[in-house]
Amino acid sequence: MADKTATRESYGKALAELGDKYENLVVLDADLAAATKTGIFKKAHPDRFFDCGIAENNMIGVAAGLALSGKIPFASSFAMFAAGRSYEQVRNSVGYPHLNVKIGATHGGITVGEDGATHQCCEDFALMRVIPGMTVICPADDIEARGAVEAAIKYNGPVYMRFGRMAVPNVHTADYKFEIGKGVLLRDGADVTIIANGVEVSEALAAAEMLSGEGIDAAVVNMATIKPLDGELVLKMAKKSGAIVTAEEHSVIGGLGSAVAEYLGETYPTPVYKVGVKDVFGRSGPAKELLSLFGLDAKAIYEKAKEAAERKR
Amino acid sequence: MEEKKLSCLTETARNVRVGIIDAVYSASSGHPGGSLSVADILTYLYFEEMNIDPAKPDDPERDRFVLSKGHTSPALYSVLAHRGYFPVEDLKTFRKSDSYLQGHPDLKKTPGVDMTTGSLGQGVSAACGMALAAKLDKSPRRVYAVMGDGESEEGQVWEAAMFAAHYKLDNLCFVLDWNGLQIDGPIEEVMNPTPYREKFEAFGWNVTDADAHSFESLEAAFNTARACKGRPTVIIARSVKGKGVSFMENQVSWHGAAPNEEQYKTAIAELNA
């Protein structure tokens, strides 16, 4: 397996590098700089890093005020607190006035691991996606995470980005250019399409390999942008394969799976099977083990995709 | 304060109050009590204190104002209209479905509104961000936020208070409109947020008192804020909810109720007397 990197690490490094290029970049954190990796930015640009202490709600408001004064603020915390605790601040002080605030949320999903359910946010896509005008991104690997940070800087408007704690392999090559709102077909196939994001992309690729061994030709799409959804690509793959499996480290309610199903329901009704956290809270344990325990590993995707392909017949 | 300046501000504030009553009456909804209690504070800020130009509402070097107690938007709209940001006549469109004057301030819709507010406790944080940005830019621009006394029950207010003192935002000035009443009753009975002075002092703020209905007192307080270095300032402004309309004064029932036609006529007659 290739070298692995946690996307939170990519996030911190990208901020530090881009800080040279974008002088209006300002980074806020809520006493988690060592974990969110914004500490890397702090070291490189101490004059543009502000710790807000354990006070996420104020941090989001401060970000709003900075954005209204021409800065490009990245407000960072764990997904649970950025999207969860501060939901209403994001909704009313950032989303409603459509301010140029970037929310860099790390430790999304159950691969937070040992910290357990209180820190395993599996609802952030749903919470952020429902805010009008909010862009929601969950990159799959180091290359995409870095690209997504710069894309968010160049885009004028609110962006929620989720990064992970667990190290993941690269699924893209160095020449890959991330674009907001564009999915990527990583592997073509005609029997079933797996649409995944975040840590689930590499799991989906492994699942496709397993399916191929049984004569099932599975396509894999990396859908890093949950909103706005790349409807064109979803539609194309639905028409081509006739069955969709979504895979995300998020509740099966309200996330990528819901976005895909909502879209296809109104454009080209197609069976959509969801791999995700099944309306339950997480628990403590090693990240890798939790992926299996909660039915989010390659095997779970393989089984779901096989069922989808077989039901088609 | 010069006699001429004082009479000019007094006359402006009277017009601002008429605008508040007009707006709330036309909408048959809104928050007259708290709007009337902040009317003099906002008048002083927009006609004396702040470096602003109604012709350039987006000037990056303007001073900033955040009405953290966003429900008193009629006061802000009336001041903005009388200051020349938009026609006074438009106050009568307040809260109507085709109006740019939303129930709570909306920076995307109304010229002169620097921050969208309405959800209590949030505006003060945005004001902190604006003040921090001015520091980063090494700009002399100042940031003002008016918050309610009941609003101080929101924990976020104290997160913001910690932040502003920690980063020594001496370009930031909060005005606490202490009218003593919130929706469910007197603030001390609902959830006592006092003492204010001691709380803000403990958070590292420069604290000064003012009579919210005396321009001389407000002038002295804002001068104190300007002169203070290294710390943010809060002006604890004792006010009367419903100030200027006798039957609304100190009545909690006028927090969020519109006058009927008879009450409207009485109110306008009193203000014009």
Image (cartoon, grey):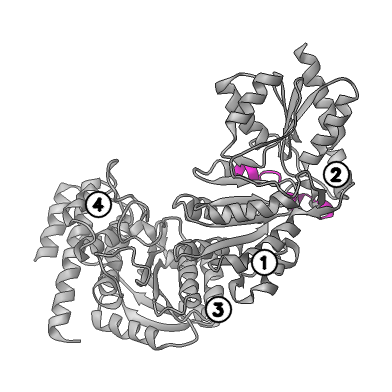
Does the magenta portion include A126? Answer: yes
Under circle 1, the secondary element is: helix
**What kind of residue is marked 1?**
Ala
Does the magenta portion include A101? Answer: no
Q: In which quarter of the image is the N terminus of chain B?
A: bottom left
**What kind of residue is marked 3?**
Tyr
Nearer the observer, disc 1 or disc 2? Answer: 1
Name the chain letter of the residue that bears numbered label 4: B
Report whether residue A84 is seen: no
Residue identifier under label 1: A16
Question: In the image shown, does A215 or B69 lie closer to the viewer?
Answer: A215
Nearer the observer, disc 3 or disc 4? Answer: 3
- Asked whether, in this view, residue B175 is left or right of residue A216, the answer is left
Q: How many angstroms separate mark 3 from mark 1 (CA)? A: 22 Å
Residue identifier under label 3: B167
Name the chain letter of the residue that bears numbered label 3: B
Q: Residue B24 carries which label?
A: 4
Residue B17 occupies quadrant: bottom left
Identify the residue at image location x=88%, y=29%. Answer: A210
Identify the residue at image location x=25%, y=67%. Answer: B243
